[in-house]
Amino acid sequence: MSLTHVQPFDGEALTASAMRERDLIERAKRNPYDFGVLYQRHCAELLDYVYRRTGDVHVTEDLVSDVFVIVMRSLPRYRFRGIPLRSWLFKIATNTVNRWARRQRRQACVALKADRVANTEAPSTPRGGCEWHVQRALLTLPPRYQAVLSLYYMEELSVRETAAIIGCREGTVRSRLARARDALREKLKGRR
């Protein structure tokens, strides 16, 4: 995993809350209790994000555990640059889910086709979020499209924040969003 960090946003001064976060990060590098505080602050949000991408509670728990293992191993090399830790965590989560999604994409495509043929009803989902068929269709998209749709629409991040998390330009995010919306719309046509 690369520890490429997001560049600070221009013109933003370090706020009091950013200084508190920086101090907590420095303490968490040395103290497991403070790492636990970071975990508690961000775990629920990451669980929601990863669940929206996977649609499976058990897979979500495993992937978020993987994310925090990566964070624990990488935190000693992390340098605070005024960007919220949340962005770095979303970047790690996005990369982790993308790796998983590449392995699962083929299976999801087969399952979506089977759903269309059988016209089966969705199982109940333990968490809120997308309708089941939309989530299933989302899983059939390439991971780069899944990531931008999930971060922008479901996590309600700006184009700028999304670009910083996935490590590309804002224009690239906008084009991926347009292509991803078109691809998702196409996948959903078979459900109507």
Image: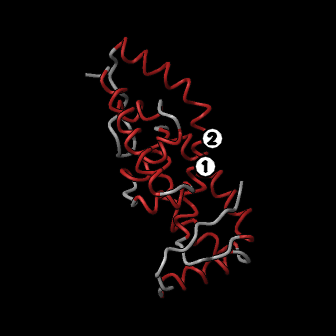
- Label 1 packing within 10 angstroms: few (<14), some (14-19), many (20+): some
Q: Which residue is tagged 2?
A: 99
Quadrant for residue 120, please give it: top left
Outermost residue, left side = 192
Q: Amino acid at mark 2?
A: Arg
Outermost residue, front side = 171
Quadrant for residue 19, please give it: bottom right
Q: Which residue is tagged 1?
A: 95
Cβ atoms at labels 2 and 1 below 8 Å apart:
yes
Q: Position of residue 165 (x, y in %)?
A: 53, 58
Q: Nearer the viewer, residue 168 or 4?
A: 168
Q: Is the C terminus in the top left, top right, bottom left or bottom right quadrant?
A: top left
Q: Nearer the viewer, residue 14 or 174?
A: 174
Q: Secondary structure at mark 1?
A: helix
Asked if residue 109 lies left or right of residue 92, the reply is left
Asked if residue 191 lies left or right of residue 157, the reply is left
